[in-house]
Image: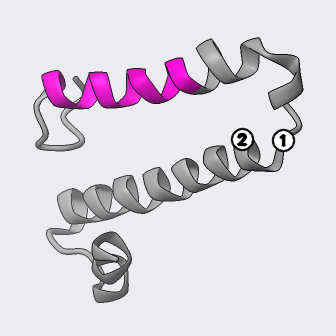
Amino acid sequence: ILGLVRSPVTATLPQIGSRLFLTWGILWSFPETQSHILVTSLVISWSITEIIRYSFFGLKETLGFAPSWLLWLRLV
């Protein structure tokens, strides 16, 4: 929508929407899951993945390239 990534909106929105639905719509609806270590690790791992992903795209779009270490993190 904002033009930050080249992926079509039809692919990006369901991906983001499913993560939001899973974390808020399902996991947070059950109080016993809110403090579970697996839920915490799920949210942290998704957050790290998105930080790497959008940092890569942001640098590539603004500078025309991304550092090799960020490319490596993106491919791992």
Q: Amino acid at mark 2?
A: Val
Label annotation for residue 39: 2
How many other residues sit within 10 Å of disc 2, few (<14), some (14-19) or many (≥20)?
A: some
Q: How is the image coloured?
A: one colour
Q: Amino acid at mark 1?
A: His
Q: Residue at x 79, y 16 (%)?
A: 30
Q: Are marks 1 and 2 in contact (CB under 8 Å)?
A: yes
Q: In the rendered structure, which segment of residues is drawn in magenta?
A: 9-22
* Residue 42 drawn at (x, y percent): 62, 47
Q: Is residue 53 one of those drawn in magenta?
A: no
Q: Residue at x 43, y 62 (%)?
A: 52
Please indicate whether residue 21 sits to the left or right of residue 64 in the image: right
Task: Give the answer, above or below, for where 1 lies relative to 53.
Answer: above
* Residue 63 drawn at (x, y percent): 22, 68
**Total marks placed:** 2
Label 1, secondary structure: give it.
loop
Quarter of the picture holding the C terminus: bottom left
Label 1 – label 2 distance at C-alpha? 6 Å
Task: Give the answer, above or below, for where 17 lies relative to 49.
Answer: above
Task: Give the answer, above or below, for where 74 lies relative to 45.
Answer: below
Q: Nearer the viewer, residue 72 or 43?
A: 43
